[in-house]
Image (tube, rainbow, N blue to C red):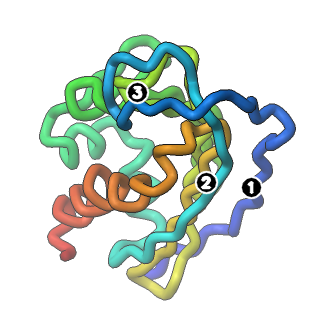
Amino acid sequence: MKHDSPKASLNIDVDNLQDGKKSDEKIGTNSRNDCGSLSRFNFIIDCNISAHLMASSLTDPALMSKWTLGSFKVDGDTLSLYSGLIIYKMIKIEGNLILMNWRLNGWNSECESQCAFEITPNGDERCTSTITFSNAPSDFKDVAPDFFNRYYITPISRLFGIF
């Protein structure tokens, strides 16, 4: 079965990046009192799942509840995963482009970054996910790829029996 989707363009406003002092606090701690140094970065993850299934897994609440093993909550327009570790609001879903305001629980509530998933089909049953952050704490940049593999890609792949 082939799932073709048009490639979406991605425009993130980098003019609104804020400069600040880099915090010595670790990612996920609750003691951040400012957003620290902010940056824009992206990374690419190749996935053994179709673009259609990946996009559906990131936007369908029934599927989200399954791959998070029930650790998914909707409160108005705010979604949280893994008992509130990840908090976000969907901003735009257009084809295989998913744009959200995203943050970790340990970040100051005013430190909301933009996160975009751009999912590109790569054959019938594979896709490439380009994940772009804007206004994200700089200290998240080095751990973000492993974080997304651990908390998104691996659980979604397990849901569909693909390792």
> Three-letter amino acid code at disc 3?
Ile
> Three-letter amino acid code at disc 1?
Leu
* Pointer 1 or 3: first along the chain: 1
Residue 24 location, quadrant: top left
Whether pointer 1 and pointer 2 mark residues with C-beta atoms closer than 8 Å, the reply is: yes
Look at mark 3 in the image and give the residue it sits on. 87
Q: Could you tell me which secondary element the residue under label 2 belongs to?
A: strand
Look at mark 2 in the image and give the residue it sits on. 132
**126, 114: nearer the viewer:** 114
| Residue at the (55%, 57%) spot, across then down | 131
* Disc 2 from disc 3: Cα separation: 16 Å
Please say if 5 is above or below 121. above
Looking at the rendering, in which quadrant would you find the C terminus?
bottom left
Look at mark 1 in the image and give the residue it sits on. 10
Q: Could you tell me which secondary element the residue under label 1 belongs to?
A: loop
**119, 40: nearer the viewer:** 40
